[in-house]
Amino acid sequence: MSGSGDQTAGARVVLEQVDKRYGDRLALSGIALDVRPGEFVTIVGRSGSGKSTLLRVLCGLEQPTRGAARVLASREVAAREAVRVVFQEPRLLPWRTVLENTCIGGPRGRDARARDVLDRVGLGDRLNDYPGVLSGGQRQRVALARALVHDPKVLLLDEPFGALDALTRIGAQRLVESLWAQRRFTAILVTHDVEEAVLLGDRVLVFDEGRIVESVAVDLPRPRAREVPEVGRLAGVLLDAIFRRSPEEGGLSRRASREDVSRHPATLLAPTGLEIARH
Ligand SMILES: Nc1ncnc2c1ncn2[C@@H]1O[C@H](COP(=O)(O)OP(=O)(O)OP(=O)(O)O)[C@@H](O)[C@H]1O
């Protein structure tokens, strides 16, 4: 897909030997990463492998213990405009309308832009509704609009589709991909779904114990479908990388097979057999 309309260019993201330590736990260990402007990088890995910590470092919620994380835009942009995050829960204010939620945190006079973005995510006719009357997928689209209204150079997505049902999830994936193709921001998405990682990523990184243990380039035309054999093959490669090591401590109670995971994608959420809580 080629960019059209807006000429917004994404920023380059560079991490140099980043460690993040919590007490004696090393959540990130020597992460070196260079993300091209406009690249779509997806990240998979077992629970606790450091994926969310990486996003928190990138958006400035956490400081690296060692090393540096840099966002390099082609022109000077305010930090708050450079990087935006969409979380698994939409985090909307229930007493504010869709339009008001979308404008939150932005400078005044963003109404027109917010309306435009809400239109693009298919909520142009829900501006004055409150979050309580929206579906889960619609709320997540408001969260996406709220991030995009700032015209970010980097969009961080932390399991943004995790709480959506399968059909809504496919629609939301396509929406994110088409917005990315239009606006050319740099996208970094954390997911537990290896197929989703292949469908959306130019490159998929596998995390394990705070390190990048595998990097898989996905050189397939877009939009991609789960039915394409190469998508399934790459998803298998990723699963092998995720489960290659079965650590004695804190790891899998048994080695999950590829079949287990494709039948029950949520297996990855709870590799030690814990109850899976869905939001
Ligand atoms: N604020 C914190 N204080 C202490 N330890 C933390 C904190 N945040 C994360 N950790 C630890 O850092 C490690 C990495 O956590 P992180 O949330 O990045 O993993 P994750 O890969 O995103 O996991 P999940 O897929 O379950 O969301 C874990 O061992 C976690 O317990």
Image (cartoon, rainbow, N blue to C red):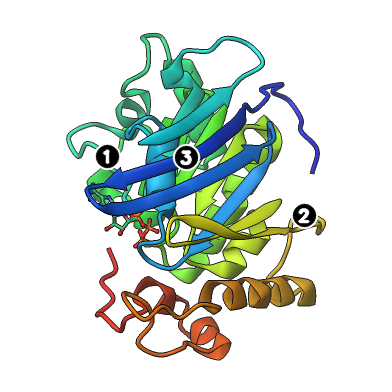
Q: Is residue 256 above or below residue 184?
A: below
Tell me how far mark 2 sits from mark 3, CA to CA.
Answer: 32 Å
Marking on residue 222: 2
Front of the two marks 2 and 3: 3
The three-letter code of the residue at mark 3 reads Val
Q: Is residue 140 above or below residue 163?
A: above
Q: Is residue 32 visible?
A: yes
Closer to the camera, 196 or 24? Answer: 24
Closer to the camera, 107 or 87? Answer: 87
| Whole-percent x, y for residue 241 in the image | 59, 72
> Residue placed at 52% from the left, 42% from the top?
122
The three-letter code of the residue at mark 1 reads Leu
Q: What SS does tag 2 mark?
A: loop
Q: Is residue 86 visible?
A: no
Marking on residue 18: 3
Q: Which label's residue is closer to the chain start, 2 or 3?
A: 3
Answer with left or right where residue 199 lies relative to residue 194: right
Q: What SS does tag 1 mark?
A: loop
Q: Is residue 16 above or below residue 271?
A: above
List the residue tagged with mark 1: 92
Q: What SS does tag 3 mark?
A: strand
Report the quarter where the C terminus lies.
bottom left
- How many tags in the picture? 3
| Whole-percent x, y for residue 181 in the image | 70, 39
Answer with left or right where residue 28 lies relative to residue 184: left
Q: Which label's residue is closer to the chain start, 1 or 3?
A: 3
Marking on residue 11: none
> Residue placed at 82% from the left, 56% from the top?
221
The three-letter code of the residue at mark 2 reads Arg
Q: Are marks 2 and 3 in contact (CB under 8 Å)?
A: no
Q: Quadrant of residue 232?
A: bottom right
| Whole-percent x, y for residue 53 in the image | 37, 47
